[in-house]
Amino acid sequence: MKFASAVLTAVLCTTMASHALAATAEMPSQADSTMIDIAGHPVPVVKGGLYERFRSNPPLSLVAQQLPGVDLSWFEGLEKHKVDMGFESYSPNFYYQNSRVTAVYTADLERLRALMPAAVLAHVQPLQVWPGRGLIAFTAYTYEHCDNDAYNEVAVSIITNKPGKANLGPFTLVGQSLSGDFWGYVLKLPVNTELARVRGVVGYNLPKWLTAIDRKEDGLSVAYEIADSQTGKLDVSFRARKLGDLSSSVDTVTNSFTNLDHQGQLAYGYAVSRQLRHGSSRDEDLVVLTLGDGSLSNFLRSLQLGKMLKYEYVPQFQSALYAPKPLATLLGER
């Protein structure tokens, strides 16, 4: 995600026919699923889907047949490698057709620091945009077609400096924006398929859990409704207005995260994304984040979210997610 401070005029898309996508990227029904084993975890997956058949390494020619009209040429230049991520897989994992919406908010800086492990804080810290305030990125993703089938995901991340680089607050933020190289620490990452949860927890050391995440769309806006995993009741609602005058120039960005692996060692991972249609705005009225009574809402309240600094609407992007590596390899340590 890019956090440049450019202001774009929000032009609402009123010419699109209204339609709902609440059923997009849901857990497969029992009749449509089969069980597989991932690192000792029984996982339901789409019967005959890409993951059951190819375990993150499907032939690109087959994907092209399933997605006529989608340009997959970028993936042809990316080489997959077999890796051990706690289970055998291939890296990078490909995401062929996706969309996302992101809102960047200020948050209480001391609270953000308290949520990061001391070992991670020794290398990266939250960016301070003004005294006592850091930044949180709230992003809702829909992966319509990827190596591990379709799913929805919501990420709550602290924006940080890059390991080994100085933390100069707003200057670091501008530098990351200009280079398209963004860093963060992931706090929360609910998903709506067990396959995405297990792969994320076991393979990428990420704080994922399984819950219902419904995506709804009409001619004016896109909304994500996140259920509380304990009660099943609606907990968080995130509604974002569509932007007009979208750029169709390819914008390539890298989003990286630092965390601890299952042995407590420092690690990092990253995804390279091609944003094919994208726009942004600083108009706070375009985004509504509604909190309920569940655990995620209570967590978000504890961050003391403030002003929204930027909203991004990216209805079309492609991505390649790489398996995590020891942080020492990035820092040049032995």
Image (tube, grey):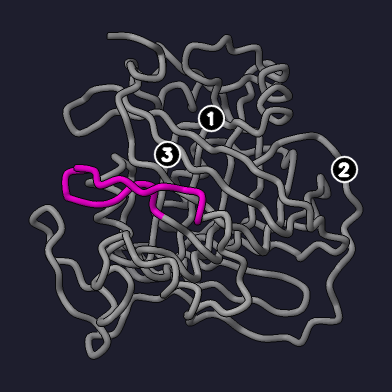
**Spatial separation of the CA atoms under disc 3 and disc 2:** 28 Å
Q: Which residue is mark 1?
A: 183
* Circle 3 crowding by C-alpha within 10 Å: few under 14, some 14–19, many from 20: some
Identified at 74% across, 43% down, the residue is 310
**Spatial separation of the CA atoms under disc 3 and disc 1:** 13 Å
- Sequence order check, earlier mark of 3 and 2: 2
Q: Which residues are magenta?
A: 76-93
**Spatial separation of the CA atoms under disc 1 and disc 2:** 22 Å
Secondary element at image label 2: loop
Mark 3 vs mark 1, foreground winner is 1
Mark 3 vs mark 2, foreground winner is 2
Identified at 43% across, 51% down, the residue is 296
- Sequence order check, earlier mark of 1 and 2: 2
Identified at 88% across, 48% down, the residue is 8
* Circle 1 crowding by C-alpha within 10 Å: few under 14, some 14–19, many from 20: many
- Percent x, y for residue 294? 41, 57
Q: Amino acid at mark 2?
A: Val
Secondary element at image label 3: strand
* Left or right of 297 in this view: 132: right
- Is 246 colored magenta in this rendering? no
Q: Which mark is residue 226?
A: none
Identified at 21% across, 73% down, the residue is 44
Image quadrant in which you'd find residue 264 = top left
Pick whichever, 71 or 141, lies toward us: 71
Q: Amino acid at mark 3?
A: Leu
- Percent x, y for residue 102? 64, 50
Q: Amino acid at mark 1?
A: Trp
Pick whichever, 43 or 128, lies toward us: 43
Q: Which mark is residue 7?
A: 2
Q: Which residue is mark 3?
A: 187
